Image (cartoon, coloured by chain):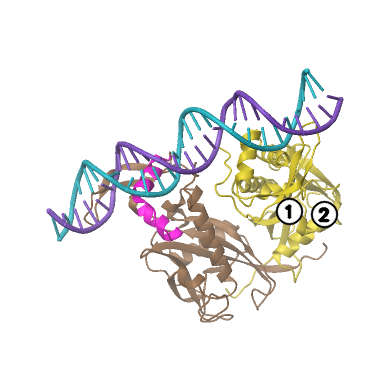
Chain colours: A yellow, B brown, C purple, D cyan
Amino acid sequence: MSEYPTVAVTVDLVVLTVREDRLQVLTVRRGEEPYRGRWALPGGFLRPDEDLPAAAGRELEEETGVTSGQVHLEQLGSYGAPDRDPRMRTVTVAYIALAADLPVPVAGTDAADARWQPVADLVGRTAGGRGALAFDHHQVLRDGVERARAKLEYTPLAAAFCGREFTVGDLRRVYEVVWDRPLDPRNFHRKVTGTAGFLEATDRTTARDGGRPARLYRTGPATSLHPPLLRG
Amino acid sequence: MSEYPTVAVTVDLVVLTVREDRLQVLTVRRGEEPYRGRWALPGGFLRPDEDLPAAAGRELEEETGVTSGQVHLEQLGSYGAPDRDPRMRTVTVAYIALAADLPVPVAGTDAADARWQPVADLVGRTAGGRGALAFDHHQVLRDGVERARAKLEYTPLAAAFCGREFTVGDLRRVYEVVWDRPLDPRNFHRKVTGTAGFLEATDRTTARDGGRPARLYRTGPATSLHPPLLRG
DNA sequence: CTAATAGTGTCTATCAGACAGTATACC
DNA sequence: GGTATACTGTCTGATAGACACTATTAG
């Protein structure tokens, strides 16, 4: 108890979005050792006078340009295996961010390139193998995706993947993509519009694909869903 | 990115048990500054070559004498406000442990005293006020209790609060104490015995308070409950 | 016997899932 | 018109909650 071993603390982000009908994650190509040239989750070191959520918000803005008010950001968990970074002892605090489809990613200072990649392409790969993510980011990504899937069941967070206004069909496609299974459009509509506080109707509608115009909704005040939407 | 600010990383534990029909948490009285004499959650510094779960298991064993095989231990989250420890910059990784009623706590090397305290007595207090927990442990405790409450809904973890063999009545009392609300014994019995994989019946029974002997059960193989038990 | 806890059966309101049918757009 | 999407209504099987009833112990 008299010695205080010190550790480098980083914050890493699992930034998820729904693009082209697939769940995608923001990745950056590492410009430095270790793992130079490999894809990794965006992140960086915790600054001396910065709280953890602030660091996550700062990294998010540096990598994507979005301010944290536009996305849902929550702590996922920490990872600290002694050999996770060959340079030194590190502990990373991972966050997940759920974002609407964003403009092209902004390359950060420590990243040579930034790209959205479908989650299915990455989690299918063996950890540590060719094309796999650097560090233990393979595990972080898996945990983050599972957290997002679970959260859709009992919170209204699916709306975080949509813009400020969206249709019930938009929301349903989010669920279908994240859960990777089809949902009955009619039952889904009845369910989400019947759950108090989930959605707030606007007076406007939109038409896109030659169908009946759909009403536009905004996020309601609810923070959890009772009863939950079940994956089965 | 060229500087690596270092931080002291600690692991803190929210060890919960059901004792005397109340949800209780293990606290230790601090023997050193800061917060000397205050109650705090047990915890300590991460060792140089130790993974996070290993550190949590080691601290648990040091404080309670139980090995991690006997309890459920899972990561709760990390807390790293820059001023959370006046000595230096620290980040703590908090774990929750759900344990059956244990023998009298063992005082650790850095604790003058250790004691179970009812959660209700602690979370009712103002953070930082008289009798409150040291550091930001008030918030950690609140988060840990809420995690435990939520986990009982959709996992069979309530059994972690019971011994190796227990009755349906024992299990129901765990739910009632953790959720702080009465449950119908008959519906509860039908529900938990009807959920596949939750409980495994033994061929033995027990009688305690002058009622019909109750069958003893062990934990089943299920890791989640479908459908969940709902708090309402 | 009474009191207490364990466990089963039954009823009802509600809900998830299946799916018919109507509404309103584009072509 | 045809096709596509949005939305409403209806049916059915399953379930949560309420509660009557039986079973088996202690005292």
Rendered position, A230 above or below B41: above
Q: Is residue B152 magenta?
A: no
Separation of disc 1 and disc 2 at Cα?
A: 10 Å
Which quadrant holds residue C24? top right
Find residue B32 and report its horizontal and vertical position in percent: 55, 80
Find residue B186 and report its horizontal and vertical position in percent: 34, 47
Q: Are marks 1 and 2 in contact (CB under 8 Å)?
A: yes
Find residue C16 and report its horizontal and vertical position in percent: 55, 38
Rendered position, C11 above or below A200: above
Q: Nearer the viewer, residue C3 or A84?
A: C3
Helix, strand, or loop for circle 2?
Answer: helix
Q: Is residue B193 magenta?
A: yes
Q: Which residues are magenta?
A: B170-195
Task: Count residues near mark 1 (Cα–Cα under 10 Å), then give few for <14, some for 14-19, many for 20+.
Answer: many
Q: Nearer the viewer, residue A23 or B37?
A: A23
Which quadrant holds residue A59? bottom right
Residue at label 1? A13
